[in-house]
Amino acid sequence: MSEEKRTLALVDDHPIVIEGLKSVLSAWTTQYNLICFSDGESVLSYIRNNHVDVILLDISLPDINGIEVCKMIKSEKPEIKIIGLSNQAEQSIINLMLSNGASGFLLKEVSSKEIMRGIEQVLNGETVLSEEVRRILSTKPDDTNSLPSLTKREKQLIQLLAQGKTTAIISEELFLSKFTVDTYRKNLLHKFSVKNTSELLVLLLENKMV
């Protein structure tokens, strides 16, 4: 009897990334079933009724931030292994993913061999960090000019917050749920280590990020 395949999920809203990983997996091994999702809600819905071994999770998703998706998955299905797979290399984002239960973080620039090795390592209970991620984490965070960068969605949200718009209005303008807007706002407060929206806007204005 052949060994049962592991189930690997990829959550990414870029078709080229999904197609690329499909190609990698088909060429590299036959021991994984790959399922793909383009947003956070889809994978959250899927895991509630289906078994998944490992999830490769992007940070920038169209609905829920990948950091929050990671936290929600681990609270519902702690046995699932999650690897952050992103172009975003800020120290704060990496730390948030790991503190929310991720078993590793890889940049999308890594080789297919490193991705496959990382999947095997997290299945063996190890933590996986690509070389560049290790370098970023070892960098002193006290450089006053090294504020985290903003994603496109975060910039849209901040511009609306700066205009004094409410969560309800922002959710309508960005076509997001009120919960998702609030989640983005909370993540931004955490990301920039501020207590409230006013402090966040002042900090971003001072650094000409708005």
Image (cartoon, helix red, strand yellow):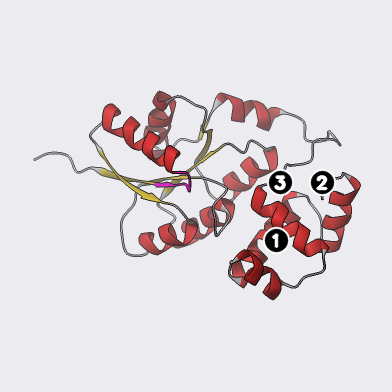
Q: Nearer the viewer, mark 3 or mark 1?
A: 3
Q: Is residue 152 left or right of residue 40?
A: right
- Would you name the residue on which mark 1 appears? 186
Compared to residue 173, the image places residue 133 above or below, namely above
What type is the residue that disc 1 sits on? Lys
Magenta region, residue range: 10-14
Dot 2 and dot 1 residues touching (CB under 8 Å): no
Seen at 47% across and 55% down, the residue is: 39
Residue under the image location 62 percent in, 41 percent down? 94
Type of the residue with mark 2: Met
> On the image, which quarter does residue 15 sit in?
top left
Report x, y in % for residue 69: 52, 56
Kind of residue sitting beneath label 3: Leu
Q: Secondary structure at mark 1?
A: helix
Foreground of the two, 77 or 15: 15
The reply to whether discs 2 and 3 touch (Cβ–Cβ < 8 Å) is yes
If you read the primary sequence from the N terminus, does the residue marked by circle 2 or circle 1 appear first? 1
Q: Which mark is residue 150?
A: 3
Provide residue 192's location: percent of width, then percent of height: 77, 49
**Counting other residues with Cα less than 10 Å from the Cα at mark 3, is it few (<14), some (14-19), or many (20 or more)?**
some
Q: Is residue 13 magenta?
A: yes
Q: Which mark is residue 209?
A: 2
Q: Secondary structure at mark 2?
A: loop
Q: In percent of the image, x 50 and y 36: which residue is there?
A: 127
Q: Earlier in the sequence, mark 3 or mark 1?
A: 3
